[in-house]
Image: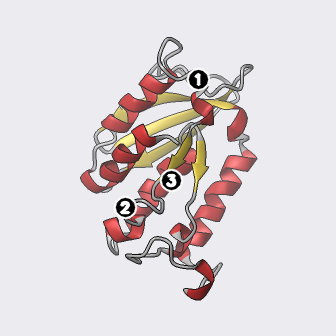
């Protein structure tokens, strides 16, 4: 699991500073760095061992969506813990999904479905990530074809090769 990103994904949408997230991405994608295949890291926002995302962000749907967007579009494999798509705020992180009024029509469920379709349409599993631009409240990624399928992009190069898909992630003010 991509635990080095979890802390930054939790705080970036809350505190509004995406530069920390970009720094971790650059370290993870460095060909001489500690991660041999960063595209295989599992990105997550919550689990049974930590407070639910919706509980940490409260009713702030903008921050919840910013964190989910980052998890879904960043390099690696997004890992959605059951109930995240429902906006669960339960203090018992292991409560049974089926006893809580599960629905596939919640806003977060629909949002995750849309982001997953974007990942599929643009074949993110076989695209590197390039950090095109980063500011405190904005991170722009380009997802480009790779021949190695290892998830290592040209972090921070600012170049967007032909055939790539570019996405901007914003942190709320």
Q: Which comes before the other along the chain, label 2 or label 1?
A: 2
Give the residue pinned by disc 3. Answer: 69
Residue under the point 49% across and 40% down: 2
Q: Look at discs 1 and 3 and give the one toward the viewer.
A: 1
Residue marked by disc 1:
152
The residue carrying pointer 2 sits among few (fewer than 14), some (14 to 19) or many (20 or more) residues within 10 Å by Cα, namely: many
- Residue 9 falls left or right of residue 165: left
16 over 82 or under it: above or below: above
Question: Colour mode?
Answer: secondary structure
Residue at the spot 72% in from the left edge and 33% down from the top edge:
126
Q: Secondary structure at mark 3?
A: helix
Circle 3 residues within 10 Å: few <14, some 14–19, many ≥20: many
Looking at the image, tell me whether mark 1 or mark 3 is earlier in sequence order: 3
Which circle marks residue 17 in the picture? none
**Of pointers 2 and 3, the one earlier in the residue sequence:** 2
Q: Nearer the viewer, residue 95 or 131?
A: 95
Q: Secondary structure at mark 2?
A: helix
Left or right side of 77 for 159: left
Q: Which residue is mark 2?
A: 63
As displayed, is residue 79 above or below residue 155?
below
Q: Quadrant of residue 27?
A: top left
Q: How many marks?
A: 3
């Amino acid at each position: 699991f991509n635990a080095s990103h979890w802390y930054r994904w939790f705080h970036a949408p809350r505190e509004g500073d995406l530069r920390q997230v970009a720094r971790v991405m650059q370290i993870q994608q460095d060909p001489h760095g500690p991660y041999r295949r960063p595209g295989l890291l599992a990105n997550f926002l919550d689990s049974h061992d930590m407070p639910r995302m919706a509980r940490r962000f409260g009713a702030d749907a903008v921050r919840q969506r910013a964190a989910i967007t980052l998890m879904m579009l960043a390099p690696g494999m997004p890992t959605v813990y059951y109930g995240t798509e429902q906006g669960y705020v339960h203090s018992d992180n292991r409560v049974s999904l089926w006893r809580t009024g599960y629905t596939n029509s919640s806003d977060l469920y629909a949002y995750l479905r849309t982001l997953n379709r974007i990942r599929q349409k643009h074949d993110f599993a076989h695209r590197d990530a390039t950090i095109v631009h980063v500011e405190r409240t904005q991170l722009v990624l380009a997802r480009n074809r790779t021949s190695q399928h290892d998830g290592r992009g040209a972090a921070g190069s600012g170049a967007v090769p032909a055939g790539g898909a570019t996405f901007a992630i914003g942190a709320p003010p």
